Amino acid sequence: MLIALAGGAVVGLALGALGGGGSVLAVPVLIYLLGFAPPAAATASLLIVLATSATALFAHARDGRVRWGTGALFAAAGLVPAALGGLLSARLPEWLLTGGFALLAGVAAVRMVRRAPESAAVRRGAPAVAGAGAGLGAVTGVLGVGGGFLTVPALVQIVGLRMRVAVGTSLLVVSVNALAALLARGGTAGTLDWAVIAPFAGAAILGAWDGRRLAAKVPGETLRRTFGAVLLGVSALMLLDTALG
């Protein structure tokens, strides 16, 4: 219970402050600290991230930090890929899911640690936005991640949004993608340990509100680099475990 509450608080802080990163922290906690199998951890992560991101979205929308049109296009393009990815995930071996997740987390960590000035962003048209959304949807479905840790950089570098607005808009994309991936997984949620997931999700929802306030006080660059360093360590440990297992 204590691990679930602590893990949920950290996941909520990440989603509320950065617009993503909840799943890349939730999945390792569920697997290595709470004993979930990778497929169950992916499904549980989607449930937790959906509840948390929807709550955080409301808070950011109230502050005027959500671009609904851009977010809707990005999310809509990922619906079918997310659903197909969810179906594919059930047919993949556990080691492949864990290894793929670790590699993706490592790539995301490097992108977060490296400085990417907002002035370098190049505004692209609707096809580029839709293409990025479709790719993120596929990742969400297969690996059970909300995709926010990749959505935020895409919204900044491809769409040209400023960091704080990209964080809020990312939460819309994360919510839609997580819901689509969950629906594709069918009845797998019925086999989950709700005694663990419920407190995890509750703590994450509360943490998301604190994350939103933290984002308003701490520079986005500092938040992004700190999170990236933590994520890089998690990725390295998961890759090592996959190689040794």
Image (cartoon, rainbow, N blue to C red):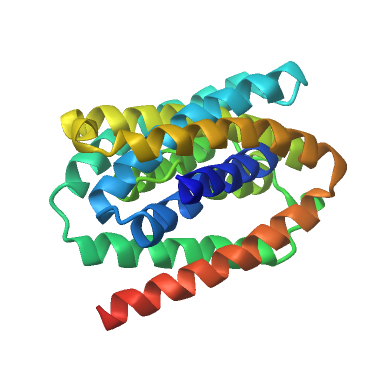
Q: Residue at x 30, y 31 (%)?
A: 182
Query: Does 44 sit left or right of 37 as displayed?
Result: right
Q: Quick check: can you spot residue 80?
A: no
Where, by quadrant of the figure, is residue 197 drawn? Answer: top left
Total label count? 0
Instruction: Name, please, the residue furthest toward the bottom.
Output: 244
Q: Nearer the viewer, residue 164 or 31?
A: 31
x and y percent of residue 142 in the render?
A: 29, 48
Q: Residue at x 25, y 38 (%)?
A: 192
Name the residue located 24 percent from the left edge and 49 percent from the top edge: 39
The answer to whether residue 168 is above or below residue 31 is above
Left or right: residue 189 versus residue 234 is: left
Question: Do we see residue 171 in this rendering?
Answer: yes
x, y (%) of residue 41? 32, 48
142 to the left or right of 69:
left
User: Which residue lies at the image location 33% right of the left edge and 50% below the top edge?
Assistant: 143
Quarter residue 37 falls in:
bottom left
